[in-house]
Image: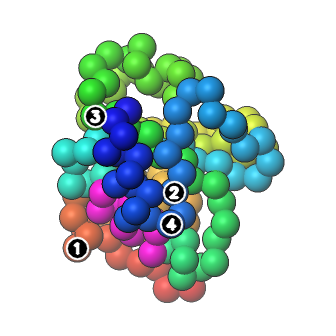
Amino acid sequence: MTRDFRERIGSRYSVFTVWSPGDPIQTKGVRWLIGVSEWSIDDFVLLEILERELAAKNITDRIDVFDATDFTTDEHYQPFVPGMTGVRSTTIAGCWMNGELIATGRGWEARKIILEWYGVHCERPVTRSADILVQSA
């Protein structure tokens, strides 16, 4: 992970924490770990939508992010999301509930799992913000 990534996330988003193996892991409540690539517009569209939804709904779940820009093999992902294989593109996601891994996903599937967890309906692959429809409560 580059220092620039940590600074970019920290200066742009207030609800995300940059996480690396060895950092503390929340074991109570909901914790998401999301791997993004610095070059992926789709990943940053996801973060923008997610930050907006968390703020609008006053959700305080723990959302950690990591830099997956230079990951090239499944082994790179293991310290972040155990069991993650077949990765061809980011977004990478793992969701823990009270310390137990309960959901994982990669690419479009990861974006859909994350957003639908927070009540954002995805009708097709999330590749631009126009592709998202927010469900009314």
SS category of the residue bearing label 3: loop
How is the structure coloured here?
rainbow
- Taken as a whole, is the magenta stretch helix, strand or loop? helix
Q: Which mark is residue 69?
A: 3
Q: Which label's residue is closer to the chain start, 4 or 1? A: 4
Using the numbered discs, state the Cα–Cα distance from disc 4 to disc 2 in whole angstroms: 6 Å
**Which class describes the residues within 10 Å of circle 4: few (<14), some (14-19), or many (20+)?**
few
Question: What residue does disc 4 label?
Answer: 14
Q: Amino acid at mark 2?
A: Phe
Residues at marks 3 and 4, CA–CA distance in whole angstroms: 21 Å
Q: Tell whether position 48 is magenta.
A: yes
Residue beneath the point at 38% across and 64% down: 12
Q: Earlier in the sequence, mark 3 or mark 4?
A: 4
Residue 97 within the segment the image draws in magenta: no
Query: In the picture shown, does residue 97 fall above or below 8?
Result: above
Structural crowding at the residue carrying mark 2, measured as other residues with C-alpha within 10 Å and reported as few (<14), some (14–19) or many (≥20): many
Q: Mark 4 belongs to which amino acid? A: Ser
